[in-house]
Amino acid sequence: MKQNRVSYGGAGTKAAPDRTAARLEIDCHDADGRERFLRTAARAGHAPAMYEFALHCRNPAETTYWLREAAHEDYVPAMYEYALRCIDPRHRRDWLRRAAEEGHLEAAYRLARECNDPIEKRRWLRIAAEEGHIPAVHELAMLCNDTAERRRWLQEAARHGWAEAAAELSDL
């Protein structure tokens, strides 16, 4: 019989500089054992465990609680997921910004889509696009007034299979 084991650490902890991913190995023979380990690790302050536990909670309030706790521990995936659950738009944008500043591409893209300021919108779209977020590439292309730049971004999106970009390229 396998012994239950939990390994904490790796990226995603305050000790590790790359907080965009976690190494949380759990070797349990049943779901209840996994949940107990996650709860124990979460209560001990392990941000990746808080995040994993939150994603498996059946209670929405408990999910939000653990996501908020992990986000406050600077765990980037939790920042993004917590932002998605924020009802207050200002609060949501703050958490999206924090995640985006730490390199979360979907957070940068979502933040851009919520921006009312066109300069700020382009800034976040460009950040996401330059890192290969294809919807951001396409949306940035659509905001470009310069035909050459627009063509460049559309070509990039089309190269990655974005059908709308290919169609728009033929219209240029």
Image (spheres, rainbow, N blue to C red):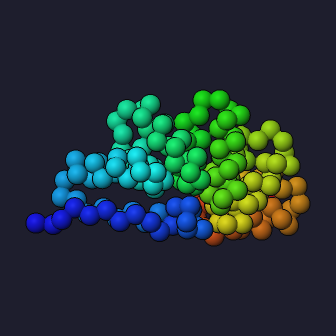
Q: Is residue 82 visible?
A: yes
Which quadrant is home to the C terminus? bottom right
Which quadrant is home to the N terminus? bottom left
* Number of numbered discs overlaid on the protein picture: 0
Give left or right: position of 13 versus 38.
right
Residues 149 and 11: in front is: 11
Residue at 64 percent across and 52 percent down: it is 99
Q: Position of residue 91 (x, y in %)?
A: 67, 35
Q: Residue furthest left?
A: 1
Residues 89 and 39: in front is: 39
Q: Residue furthest right?
A: 146
Residue at 65 percent across and 61 percent down: it is 103
Residue at 74 percent across and 55 percent down: it is 125
Q: Judge whether 30 appears above or below 157 on screen.
A: above
Residues 110 and 28: in front is: 28
Give left or right: position of 172 versus 36.
right
Q: Position of residue 85 (x, y in %)?
A: 54, 36
Residues 16 and 164: in front is: 16
Name the quadrant containing residue 57: top left
Give left or right: position of 117 versus 6.
right
Q: Position of residue 160 (x, y in %)?
A: 60, 67
Q: Is residue 80 visible?
A: no
Residue at 88 percent across and 55 percent down: it is 145
Q: Position of residue 155 (x, y in %)?
A: 71, 68
Q: Judge whether 159 appears above or below 95 on screen.
A: below
